[in-house]
Image: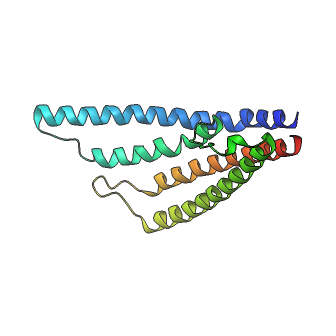
Amino acid sequence: MRIERLNNSIQSWIYPIARVTNHIASVTLFFMMLLTITDVILRKTISKSILGTVEVTEFMMVILVFFTLAQTEILDGHVKVDLIISRFSARVQAFVDMVTQFICFLLFVLFTWSVMVYAGEMKASGEVSQDLWLPIYPFIYVVAVGCALLSIALFIKFLIALMRTTES
């Protein structure tokens, strides 16, 4: 009962946010593909390249990777190797899952905090990209948002695993 309520909380507010960021990442991937194809065609046909293609692609890759992390966690899409753990009882499996979810939650909270500090430093220093002179700090904030959403998803998964250990 409590696990179902917690699962509903994932679907009620984390899942829609993760879905939106996932859609943003999908649109970003589409435009990254268009930019790359256009750049290659222009290079091959008229020997001209689009200025900053590599730079923009790198920034788009940040959006692509970090905006999909939470959705992947919610859908249990991250790689799990349970060769040994699958041989234990459901309660032991839940306990191991609880410990790993909590450790991952703590790590990503630390990542989020560190990245936020770093983004603030980059904003204060006025760091820009080399070719297009785009400010770098907004993309570092994208990393922080992605890590924060993943942290929340991991914490909820930790609570679910904690409840499974007490109910098993």
Residue 7 percent coordinates (x, y) = 77, 35
Q: Which residue is depicted at the point 34% across and 57% down?
A: 129
Nearer to the camera, 1 or 60 = 1
Nearer to the camera, 108 or 142 = 108
Nearer to the camera, 128 or 67 = 67
Q: Is residue 30 left or right of residue 162?
A: left
Residue 128 percent coordinates (x, y) = 37, 59
Q: Is residue 116 above or below residue 46?
A: below
Q: Which residue is depicted at the point 29% across and 47% down?
A: 54
The quarter of the rendered structure image containing the N terminus is top right
Q: Is residue 26 left or right of residue 105?
A: left
Residue 17 percent coordinates (x, y) = 64, 37
- Number of labels in the image equals 0
Residue 168 percent coordinates (x, y) = 86, 40
Q: Which residue is depicted at the point 37% across and 53% down?
A: 134
Q: Which residue is depicted at the point 60% across and 57% down?
A: 112
**Colour mapping:** rainbow
